[in-house]
Amino acid sequence: MSEIKKEPVVEQPEQEKKRRNPTFIIIVTVLSVLILAGLGYLGRMWYLDYASEKSNEQLQTFYSSTTAAPQTTQAQLKENPVDFKALQQSNEELYAWIEVPGTRVNYPIAQSEADDSFYLHHDYLKNYLFAGTIYTEFCNKKDFSDPVTLVYGHNMYASEGTMFTTLHSFEDKDFFDSHKTFTIYLPGRILTYNIFSAFKYDNRHIMNSFDFEHGTKDLVAFQDTMLHPHSALKNVREGVSLDEKSKVVVLSTCFLGDKSVRFLVCGVLVKDEPTK
């Protein structure tokens, strides 16, 4: 009887073994998915910043810094740098303009008549835009006469991003110390605010959490919070005091990756000037 010959056992190369190893295949697949997802996320972030930048370029046609000449005499009024007539022809809900020197904040302020969250993701022409528009809510008067007015804006993704992204510059003490004011323009008026604090705060809806209109106790408590923040991340200007007649504007934006907190920059009205 002839002997049955067996096929010789050929050892697989180490690389071939790895390729056929289920664990190796799973790891490679997961890594590929993560890389593709990361590239998709970065692409989306780039597009959102790009769309916001294009919208911002269009907005600057309504603002001319060269017209804000110093007031020379009491009888000669300043020029208002914002063309409110043209601005409000584009959208009647754009009622003010904010400029924060040293940052990229130079935008109109909107207030929706129907939906407080509308401008969270709509541009100044009411078209969808993730970056939205700087806005206030209906609970605040549009003449900034409230004891506390909240102005909201997104923190976008680029380090020099649009909307309220660059307000985070006030986290730096040197920047905070050297940038002391911001300005709000209204038709016929220029309001100047002294920035007295910038700090991390929780994500509560401030205007719904405190009764500033009728509750003096609430007002005093929140004024104390602004003057003496409990946060580890804070900058405070010494020598500022607030009372029941003070008119404060709080600029509110978020932190990337943490929805539980907000960054607040607080300013108190120190000058209200008429314009042409």
Image: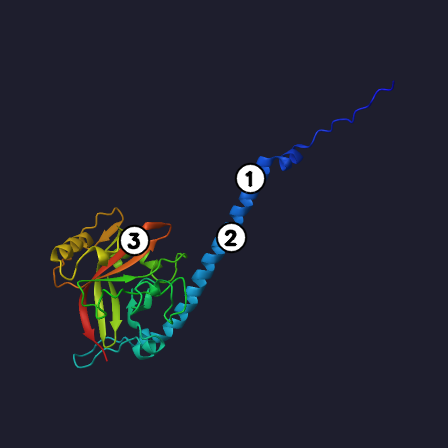
Element at label 2: helix
Q: How many marks?
A: 3
Measured as percent of width and height from the top left, residue 59 is found at 37, 71
- Label ID, residue 27: 1
Answer with left or right where residue 193 lies relative to residue 60: left
Q: Amino acid at mark 1?
A: Ile
- Label ID, residue 262: 3
Q: Residues within 10 Å of mark 2 (few under 14, many from 20)?
A: few
Residue 203 sits above or below residue 93 on the image: above
Answer with left or right where residue 39 lies relative to residue 135: right
Question: Closer to the N terminus: mark 2 or mark 1?
Answer: 1
Real-space CA distance between mark 3 and mark 1, rounded to the nearest whole angstrom: 38 Å
Real-space CA distance between mark 2 and mark 1, rounded to the nearest whole angstrom: 18 Å
- Label ID, residue 39: 2
Answer with left or right where residue 65 lies relative to residue 38: left
Q: Please identify the residue farthest to the right as the structure is shown.
A: 1
Q: Quadrant of residue 119?
A: bottom left
Measured as percent of width and height from the top left, residue 230 is found at 21, 47
